[in-house]
Amino acid sequence: MRKSVKLYAPLFILSMMFWAFCSKENSTFQSKGIIIGPDYRKCACFGEKCGCCGHYVIEIDKMGHIFAELPKGPGFDLKTAKFPVNISLDWRIDPDSCAQAWGYILIDRYRVD
């Protein structure tokens, strides 16, 4: 029995070191933000095409942005959330020209803090 413990101990230590290094790398986010809540602006619609409005408001570095959805993640539901919600996130400007004019962003990854 002691031989098997001696064989598995280095493997266990190596796996714990690997886990520790990987988890630190994934815990670094680009920004911290606060999801304020839904965007209640009225949409200007022309036929079936509506302007960029609605969805959710987030504050990042004291600047307001709008986002439509969160990527699949830690089981957080915007429809039932109690706002404001602090998050850490990786994000980028939405390349759609309409979305750029209204300050829309795409959230690539997040963690509820």
Image (spheres, rainbow, N blue to C red):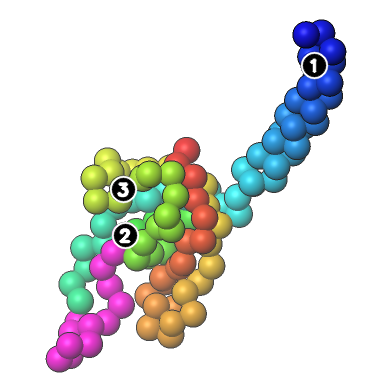
User: Helix or strand or loop: what does disc 3 sit on?
Assistant: loop
Mark pair 3, 2: CA separation: 12 Å
Write down the residue under mark 3: 77
Region in magenta: 44-56
Tell me the kind of residue under disc 2: Tyr
**One can see residue 93 in this view:** yes
User: Helix or strand or loop: what does disc 2 sit on?
Assistant: strand
**Residue at image coords 52%, 55%:** 109
Mark pair 3, 1: CA separation: 46 Å
Question: Does 85 sit left or right of 39 as displayed?
Answer: right
- For the residues carrying marks 1 and 2, which lies nearer the camera in this image? 1
User: Helix or strand or loop: what does disc 1 sit on?
Assistant: helix
Residue 70, image x, y percentages: 40, 57
Foreground of the two, 66 or 29: 29
Give the vertical position of 11 relative to 29 (above or below): above
Q: Are marks 3 and 1 in contact (CB under 8 Å)?
A: no
Q: Which of disc 1 and disc 3 is earlier in sequence?
A: 1
Mark pair 1, 2: CA separation: 55 Å
Categorize mark 3 by other alpha carbons within 10 Å: few (<14), some (14-19), many (20+): few
- Residue 14: quadrant of the picture: top right
**What's the mark number on residue 56?**
2
Q: Which of disc 2 and disc 3 is earlier in sequence?
A: 2
**Residue 103 part of the magenta segment:** no
- In the rendered image, the residue lying farthest to the left is 47
- For the residues carrying marks 3 and 1, which lies nearer the camera in this image? 1
Residue 110, image x, y percentages: 49, 50
Write down the residue under mark 1: 4
